[in-house]
């Protein structure tokens, strides 16, 4: 499901929002995953966090006033590390080192869930209300099992130096015909969200007593994989996604066609004249 937090939109499956400021000053959502540690088998794998870049696959183009507009993004890894997920979308290769406030003694390696997610800045000229309004609404390609989705992708396997293209979402017109002009969608980011069981600075479990039972807190931390725009993440971004809506055109007959049409009318008039006589 999607979580809208002020000027930032993020597709966050199984997420409860806990607002926090990102290093870039935008409001983002952290999650407290509701999955049991025993249900996951994602521990014991040592790997480094991959170095990646993210681009709009087709950053510009022309469309008609009634066209749906698909937004594709491509995640490319450098040669240092790969990235893969299992059949539930949990990251099994390419995770960063365990955060210091995660309990390494709990469960497998302290991680209860680890998945890839995506979001974007709400400042765009396609949709007046971030993902809705006029002249377009935006539909995330999200949900566990969605084809080519960048949100918790399952069975993902990008080798070091490889790349993967995702359908991020689709802009759908909310008016009969969109006004001609150029529309801008500044940036998308992909990140990894890791959830685990919390410990304090001394390594003691942190939690609450629930009817006499101690319940250890689950905490989350996010790690940015890549942005499509590494500069100004607003409408001035030089690598923004753009589509130019062309005006509907009325076909104007060529001179030869007009002449033939006139001759045909003349012949029809002569025929009617003869019939009248």
Image (tube, grey):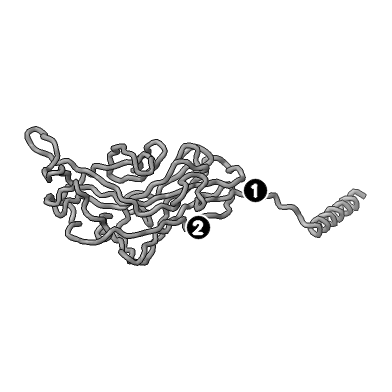
User: Is there a contact, CB below 8 Å, between mark 2 and mark 1?
Assistant: no
Identify the residue under disc 1: 248
* 83 left or right, relative to 244: left
Q: Residue at x 35, y 44 (%)?
A: 23
Mark 2, other Cα within 10 Å: few <14 / some 14–19 / many ≥20: some
Q: Residue at x 55, y 46 (%)?
A: 183
Q: Residue at x 24, y 59 (%)?
A: 92
Question: Which quadrant of the figure contains the N terminus?
Answer: top left
Q: Nearer the viewer, mark 2 or mark 1?
A: 2
Q: Which dot marks residue 58?
A: 2
Q: Residue furthest front?
A: 202
Q: Residue furthest left?
A: 212
- Of residue 177 and residue 7, the one placed in the foreground of this image is 7
Instruction: Relative to 129, say whether 171 is above or below.
Output: below
Q: Residue furthest right?
A: 277
Answer with mark 2 or mark 1, whichever residue precedes in sequence: 2
- Of residue 163 and residue 271, the one placed in the foreground of this image is 163
- Of residue 206 and residue 177, the one placed in the foreground of this image is 206
Q: Secondary structure at mark 2?
A: loop
Residue 128: where, in percent of width, then height? 50, 37
Mark 1, other Cα within 10 Å: few <14 / some 14–19 / many ≥20: few
Residue 220: where, in percent of width, then height? 25, 45
Residue 85: where, in percent of width, then height? 28, 59
**Number of marks drawn:** 2
Q: Secondary structure at mark 1?
A: loop
Instruction: Relative to 26, say whether 68 is above or below.
Output: below
Instruction: Relative to 173, say whether 74 is above or below.
Output: below
């Amino acid at each position: 499901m999607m979580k809208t937090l002020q000027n930032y939109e993020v597709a966050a499956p199984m997420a409860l929002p806990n607002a926090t400021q990102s290093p870039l000053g935008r409001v983002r959502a952290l999650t407290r995953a509701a999955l049991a540690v025993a249900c996951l088998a994602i521990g014991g794998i040592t790997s480094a966090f991959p170095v990646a870049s993210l681009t709009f696959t087709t950053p510009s183009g022309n469309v008609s006033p009634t066209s749906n507009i698909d937004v594709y993004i491509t995640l490319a890894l450098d040669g240092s590390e790969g990235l893969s997920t299992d059949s539930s979308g949990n990251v099994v290769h390419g995770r960063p080192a365990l955060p210091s406030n995660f309990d390494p003694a709990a469960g497998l390696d302290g991680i209860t869930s680890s998945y890839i997610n995506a979001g974007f800045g709400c400042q765009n000229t396609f949709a007046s209300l971030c993902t809705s309004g006029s002249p377009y609404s935006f539909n995330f390609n999200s949900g566990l099992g969605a084809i080519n989705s960048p949100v918790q992708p399952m069975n993902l396997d990008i080798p070091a130096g490889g790349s993967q293209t995702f359908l991020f979402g689709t802009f759908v017109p909310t008016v009969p015909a969109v006004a001609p002009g150029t529309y801008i969608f500044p940036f998308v980011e992909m990140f990894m969200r890791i959830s685990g069981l919390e410990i304090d600075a001394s390594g003691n479990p942190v939690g609450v007593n629930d009817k006499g039972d101690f319940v250890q807190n689950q905490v989350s931390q996010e790690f940015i994989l890549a942005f499509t725009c590494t500069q100004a993440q607003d409408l001035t971004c030089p690598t923004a996604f753009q589509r130019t809506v062309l005006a509907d055109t009325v076909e104007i007959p060529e001179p030869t066609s007009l002449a033939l049409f006139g001759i045909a009318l003349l012949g029809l008039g002569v025929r009617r004249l003869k019939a009248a006589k």
